[in-house]
Image (tube, coloured by chain):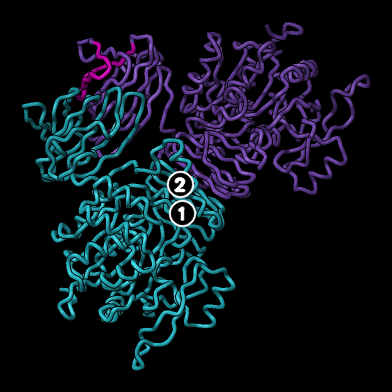
Chain colours: A cyan, B purple
Amino acid sequence: MSYSPGGEVICAVILAGGKGTRFWPLSRENCPKQMLNIVGEDTLLRQAIKRLDGFIPLDKVWVVTTDILSQDIRFHLKPLGRDAERIHYIIEPSGRNTAPAVALAAMTLNKLSSDSVMVVMPSDHIIRDTKQFHDKLRLAVEAAQEGYLVTFGVVPARPETAYGYIRSGKPLRKSTNEIFHAEGFFEKPDWETAEAFLRQGGYYWNSGIFVWKASKILKEIESHLPSLYRGLQKIGELNDLRNEAAKEIYSSLESISIDHGVMEKSRDVLVIPADFGWCDLGNWTALGDVLERDEQGNILQGNPIDIGSENCTVIACDRVLATIGLKDMVVIDTADATLVSSKEMVHEVRKVVETLKRNNREEHLVHRTVERPWGSYTVLEKGDRYKIKRIVVHPEARLSLQVHRHRSEHWVVVSGTARVTRGEEVFDIHTNESTSIPIAVKHRLENPGLIPLQIIEVQNGDYVEEDDIERLDDDYRRVKKG
Amino acid sequence: MSYSPGGEVICAVILAGGKGTRFWPLSRENCPKQMLNIVGEDTLLRQAIKRLDGFIPLDKVWVVTTDILSQDIRFHLKPLGRDAERIHYIIEPSGRNTAPAVALAAMTLNKLSSDSVMVVMPSDHIIRDTKQFHDKLRLAVEAAQEGYLVTFGVVPARPETAYGYIRSGKPLRKSTNEIFHAEGFFEKPDWETAEAFLRQGGYYWNSGIFVWKASKILKEIESHLPSLYRGLQKIGELNDLRNEAAKEIYSSLESISIDHGVMEKSRDVLVIPADFGWCDLGNWTALGDVLERDEQGNILQGNPIDIGSENCTVIACDRVLATIGLKDMVVIDTADATLVSSKEMVHEVRKVVETLKRNNREEHLVHRTVERPWGSYTVLEKGDRYKIKRIVVHPEARLSLQVHRHRSEHWVVVSGTARVTRGEEVFDIHTNESTSIPIAVKHRLENPGLIPLQIIEVQNGDYVEEDDIERLDDDYRRVKKG
């Protein structure tokens, strides 16, 4: 079921290129905030797409993301069902800001139909009241079809210094108070200003959700960001975002947000006040606004052992985490990295990520356990010339037929049955049996059974990194990564 | 070389039965504080014994400890050299307090010679000035031979509420101010009292180091702790501390410290003021007194990534630990457990240990890496019906010849050469080769080479705990543990 007022194409554009710095160590570069299940029953990205159900079908959804994330996001969206395969992807040639990303999407959709209406949404926000969200979307689509740039202004619940604001002006129509001309955009205010905004009324949190015709936003970009528009036209002529020339042009585009670049300048902006339980999880402290606290003001997840802490967010994994007498702190424990921070300074976590990057660590890139379309692997230990993984293969799934040039592998089955292709042989091994794959011999691991297959893999070699893999055949159309 | 003024036997009695609660998670039940290398160049226990060098030889050292710790301590002391084998052990039938432990040692030494002088010392203190320590010991031994109970009183450097105090009275001899009659013992005072002690002078920190003749302390125990004395006599008649009856009697003895039970009551107590850089590491906050802090007042060990913390103790392991904006905190990270505490409440760590015990966890008992006389093993993962270990075997060392009733094992060599005994076969496997040991087949792993052998062991079975081991032959005379 979808909403289709006058036969026009209504499309969702979901911005999902976020890098996952602010929620480190739970988020990593290949598993950013939008792919985390921290609030609600699913990950933020899947919730964002499910939220469209009944309004925009999956084959009218465009996910804008980076090359590095696109494959993982495609696998990540598989649980949405068979139609998830019909979701479209726009790969940003490099990570810029929202204006280039929106322009890229608008150009793509405008080619489909000059009447295309785009609903642009971040992939990492929370909206609790889906029914109201749909009602407001309907209003917004109508106004967009009249040629307006429509945004949602969230009715502020408190003075808030972490959000931008929009001031509403005159109502668009005399008959209703549901939609207004926007009179101004304001950056994150200081506390006094935020209080004044709340007192005066008519100020709303900028939700970052926009609705407009693709043709209209392109016109606005042309007039307010002419050099961006010209760059984009050149990219459009190349007709291939993976083209080196396209990458070069894109990375030279101005890194500016659509808010700054267009919304603040255009005269055709409308704001629809909304109160649908919206929240932008800016960093760890924002969890306190959306998750329930205990009597001491704590959010405790994953069974930490806590003694007498107050007003803290503590997330444990299966390691033992003990917290004693903490106040206003954030403690996040994962298998390979732990963050302990005062709430006041938790925004500095980006510096930790920068340090890891500088030191050539991997803990900002990937988790110890990496999800794959066929299952997952967990790096148990990496040493000099060896690496040990636990590999889980879903029933009836299989890894690619592959070759490694620098390592041999030993496999010990700890549960289930493994079907092994080794050179020209194919044979099964069961729990408590093992086999080995010499260097440079093509091989494949498959689970022919009905329960998950678990094996321990011991890799030996001069070089035991993930990129030593040559795929000869793959069920998941992958080219490079393991 | 040793000190032997009149041919009498001078013995050291080192109390090493501590349970390792207050320094969790660095300390564990099988690796308590005295076995940690946190201050100085060696572990506290080995430093305690090395400190006697030139005064008491190793064959006159008695280590009093518990059954559970004795084997690990024996291995732990091996690096002290060949004479370490001549160290004696007194196994407490159960963990009581210092009075029963001292009485047990006195009974043992009194049998050697009624003139035996005992130097009783904790195993987990710091003494920086060994020369002065020896000088004071000489004084103490002389006075002990005259029949006194001698203790060292540490000249207080500051008002301190974490130590007990001793008040000195008249000098023992008119000619010297080095040794005094003790006038009173005081429990840990409050801040005001501690300040007054410092102001008034003549008050010393109770070092917990005592020197006396074995026969003298036994007489004092007989008169001040008669029921303890009677119990001990019965145990002496049994002539075997491992006897069930001995265990029963010992565990019924009054759990009282030698300070409370004897020193506070006896009229023959002397105190020797000392200033030899003594410190009792009571808990994590005490590290601040003995380790150097940086300009922000922090002690940072093991390369944590810190941003803007002040007055904190942060110890990282090889996992990533990031700390941001902390004040007056203790953060201790180990492979399998992390403690985050305010300094003020860090004494509550014992409750964490109790909780782990109650929940049948293992993180209060052992570390992820366990040292063994032949090398070490690290548990990489434990799952349902399987366990994965990395095993390191020293050159020319070997594990016991053993049998498991409930698990098979797969071994993959990642470095070095392994000599494998399996049933009646003996064969070598090298890097990148593997073998497997079926259930109930006797086997042995040996490193015949000159570099450490590293193998990955995958255990499969219904039951994969350490106690499924039957030792048929062992180079280290072990009976039960793996």
Badges 2 and 1, same chain:
yes
Residue in front for this viewpoint, A400 or B425:
A400
Q: Is residue A140 left or right of residue B1?
A: left
Q: Which residues are the magenta region?
A: B428-447
Q: Nearer the viewer, mark 2 or mark 1?
A: 1
Dot 2 amino acid type: Leu
Q: Is residue A345 above or below residue B362?
A: below
**Is residue B445 on the magenta stretch?**
yes
> Where is mark 1, residue-wise?
A314
Q: Residues within 10 Å of mark 2 (few under 14, many from 20)?
A: many
- The local secondary structure at tag 2 comes to strand
Q: Residue at x 11, y 44 (%)?
A: A396
Between discs 2 and 1, the one toward the N terminus = 1
- Amino acid under disc 1: Val
Q: Is residue B187 left or right of residue A166?
A: right
Residue at the disc numbered 2: A321
Name the image quarter holding residue B40: top right
Q: Is any part of residue B303 visible from this angle?
A: yes
